[in-house]
Amino acid sequence: MRIGVKNTVAVQGTSVPKSIINLTHKKETVIAFLDGDRGGTLILKELLQIAKIDYVVRAPEGYEVEELTRKQMIKILQNKKPAKLDFFSEEESVKKENIDNFTGKEKVLFRFLKKLKIKKKEFVMDQIREIGTGMTIGLDQDLNKLFELPVSELFDNINQFKDSKILIIDGILTSRLLSQLMRINIKMIACKNKEEDLKISDKILVYYF
């Protein structure tokens, strides 16, 4: 594997070859690293039934393993989960936790908030839906509203609110503002759009509404 992990083999397609099944029974520890799409789910179902798999890790939903950076792969591998026959059922039950109540972009937002372990997801969604034109809102980890300011005043005042974890902007995310936000460890930004060619760190979740 290109991240420096040795003893790796690739499963081509959604049918697991017998050679790989046999190989899993000969190895002491086997980790299945799967794509975050339907194909990955199909392979997972088959592997759990016919191969000896000790741990399971998956790319984020909608991503293939090949699309991940070295840093992302290592982080995912560090959070591997024990493989068991009911793994898929548990994974599906987590995914369906209230997500069916949302459509379109809000499903993406739901997943972001879940990743941040935000319990009152509807509260954050309401803040985004109801934000005033040209305004910005900052929330801390407990969803206390730390400020509500015109976007034009955000850059000069954000350092006063270093406990901010979620930032909602009825405007465009610029490179100048992003540099400032990274210094105070913002976890998620919800905004209308971003500056053209702006590169965003994988440490920050960005939702466009």
Image (tube, rainbow, N blue to C red):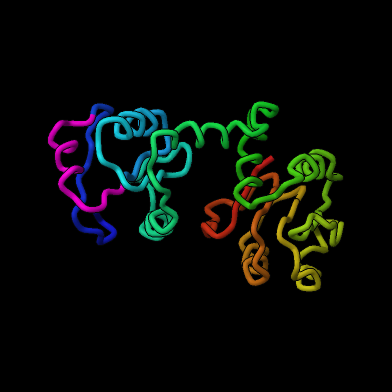
Position of 124 with respect to 61 (left or right) is: right
Query: At which x and y percent is residue 126?
Result: 81, 40
Observer-nearest residue: 88 or 155? 88
Observer-nearest residue: 107 or 189? 107
Observer-nearest residue: 151 or 72? 72
Query: At which x and y percent is residue 180?
Result: 67, 69
Q: Is residue 27 magenta?
A: yes
- Say if 136 sits above or below 56 in the image: below
Observer-nearest residue: 10 or 79? 79
The residue under the point 65% across, 51% down is 117
| Residues rendered magenta in the picture | 16-31
The residue under the point 38% across, 55% down is 77
Position of 187 with respect to 54 (left or right) is: right
Query: At which x and y percent is residue 61?
Result: 48, 38
The residue under the point 61% across, 38% down is 108
The residue under the point 15% across, 42% down is 23
Q: Is residue 51 magenta?
A: no
Determine which quarter of the picture holds residue 58.
top left
